[in-house]
Image (cartoon, grey):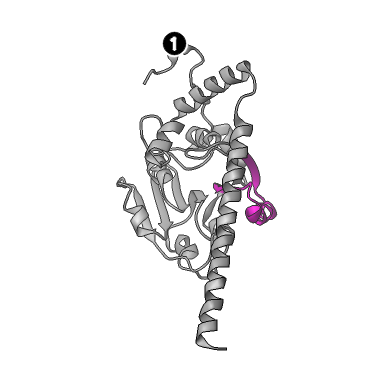
């Protein structure tokens, strides 16, 4: 085959690839538009109810999180990138004496540090970590993960960071890389009555973690709902071998206001 014909063939291949990508992008845009139209209210009563629902999201700071592209509350303070229901529940059970370890740092690091004794985290992105002004009781280890969002090889520096800390921990958050591989070391480093927080448990990829923790004797509570930045529903789950302790120690639910006169107008 001549060099000219080879070049023509390569050009045809590139053109075909670009065409497929263009068609795929058009299909995605059409699907998004179809979903947007499906979301629109159909009756005036639905429209009024939808506006009130948006008010509840404004109360939570959801619009503020969109503006700054980060999980924050209405005043701009960092919050965990978990479902709102899970954040409220954690706010009711975390105590000043608790020690926390996180697989994946972020707004949760700052938020938890204001409520517990100490927070130790591991993250693989130094630039991302540098965005957060860490309080004195929070420490982040930078460690590359050689695996994926799902698994990593045994002994991976990211996964094994918890083993180089000072267990036991009262709470372990799994919300970063190699989540299935993090379950076993989190279990070994957790206090007998400790709590594991696992985000995105509604994603089928992470379902094996639920079974593994159940086999290890953990009970589970699921917190479905929305979260900062996202408009789709999701799930954050908590696990403990002594769930009664966490339920017994929970403080009363946060009061969000039921009268229009109680709503802030800013």
Give the image location of residue 165, x and y in percent: 42, 59
Q: Indicate whether 48 appears above or below 175.
A: above
Left or right side of 134 for 88: right
Q: Which residues are magenta?
A: 193-222
**Residue 144: within the magenta?**
no
Give the image location of residue 131, x and y in percent: 32, 49
Pointer 1 residue? 261
Give the image location of residue 98, x and y in percent: 44, 43
Q: Quadrant of residue 215?
A: bottom right
Q: Residue at x 55, y 34 (%)?
A: 85
Give the image location of residue 3, x and y in percent: 50, 86
Q: Could you classify mark 1 by the number of other residues whose Cα lies within 10 Å: few (under 14), some (14-19), or many (20 or more)?
A: few
SS type, badge 1:
helix
Left or right side of 160 for 150: right
Q: Quadrant of residue 126?
A: bottom left
**Residue 217: within the magenta?**
yes
Q: Indicate whether 43 appears above or below 29.
A: above
């Amino acid at each position: 085959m001549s060099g000219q014909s080879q070049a023509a063939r390569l050009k045809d291949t590139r053109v075909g690839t670009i065409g497929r990508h263009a068609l795929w992008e058009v299909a995605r845009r059409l699907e998004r538009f179809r979903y947007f139209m499906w979301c629109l209210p159909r009756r005036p009563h639905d429209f009024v109810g939808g506006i009130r629902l948006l008010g509840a999201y404004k109360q939570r700071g959801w619009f503020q999180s969109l503006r700054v592209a980060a999980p924050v509350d209405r005043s701009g303070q960092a919050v965990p990138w978990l479902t709102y229901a899970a954040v409220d529940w954690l706010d009711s059970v975390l105590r000043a004496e608790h020690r926390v370890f996180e697989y994946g740092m972020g707004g949760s690091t700052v938020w938890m540090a204001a409520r517990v004794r100490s927070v130790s985290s591991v993250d693989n992105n130094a630039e991302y970590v540098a965005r957060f002004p860490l309080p004195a009781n929070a420490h982040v280890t930078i460690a590359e993960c050689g695996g994926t969002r799902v698994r990593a090889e045994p002994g991976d520096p990211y996964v094994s960071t918890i083993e180089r800390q000072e267990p036991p921990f009262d709470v372990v958050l799994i919300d970063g890389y190699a989540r299935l591989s993090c379950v076993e070391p989190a279990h070994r480093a957790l206090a007998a009555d400790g709590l594991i927080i696992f985000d995105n448990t509604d994603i089928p990829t992470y379902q094996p973690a639920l079974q593994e923790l159940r086999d290890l004797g953990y009970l589970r509570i699921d917190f479905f709902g929305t979260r900062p930045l996202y408009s789709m529903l999701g799930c954050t789950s908590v696990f403990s071998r002594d769930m009664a302790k966490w339920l017994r120690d929970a403080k009363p639910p946060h009061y969000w206001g039921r009268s229009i006169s109680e709503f802030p107008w800013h």
